[in-house]
Image (tube, helix red, strand yellow):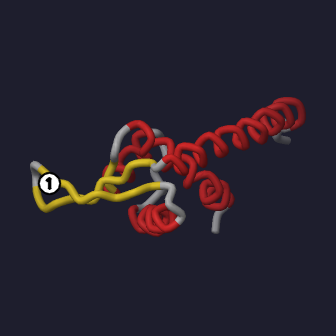
Amino acid sequence: MTLRSQLLKGILEGCILSIISRQPTYGYELSVKLQEFGLNDVSEGSIYPILLRLQKENLIQGEMKKSDTGPKRKYYALTNEGHEALKQFIYHWRTIKAPVDTIIGEGGNIR
């Protein structure tokens, strides 16, 4: 596993919660949106296990809806617990991001 993959694995759940918080979203659409944000190496195969886990943890709920262009799709929305989990993720992300940015900025010169 590459360093990028390891870093991404740790934050992907929060990114997915954040995207779903904006509007109900189905699995393939999540993949497309992550790519639009520059996370091109996230496959659908890695998204669906996360969605299942988030659903088991009652952070999201799925609902089958009609699609204009094909079969029904399962759209995911955040539960109240999901909104709280997203708040916690953002808080913890910010408490890690700021010091790391400082460390990299001050001592991250590549030789």
Q: Is 25 placed left or right of 59 in the picture?
A: left
Secondary structure found at label 1: strand
In the depicted structure, whether residue 87 falls above or below residue 50: above
- Indicate the amino acid at tag 1: Lys
Residue at 70% from the left image edge and 41% from the top image edge: 93
Residue at 42% from the left image edge and 61% from the top image edge: 43
Quadrant of the image containing the N terminus: bottom right
- Residue 24 is drawn in which quadrant? top left
Residue at 36% from the left image edge and 39% from the top image edge: 23
Q: Would you name the residue on which mark 1 appears?
A: 66
Near mark 1 (Cα within 10 A), the count class, few <14, some 14-19 or many ≥20, is: few
Q: Depth check: 25 or 34 in front?
A: 25
Q: Depth check: 20 or 107 in front?
A: 20
Residue at 70% from the left image edge and 38% from the top image edge: 91
Residue 82 placement (x, y as % from top left): 52, 49
Q: Is 93 placed left or right of 54 in the picture?
A: right
Residue 106 placement (x, y as % from top left): 88, 30
Residue 6 placement (x, y as % from top left): 66, 61
**Total of numbered circles in the picture?**
1
Quadrant of the image containing the C terminus: top right
- Residue 33 is drawn in which quadrant? top left
Going by the picture, which residue comes out furthest to the right? 107
Residue 37 placement (x, y as % from top left): 46, 39
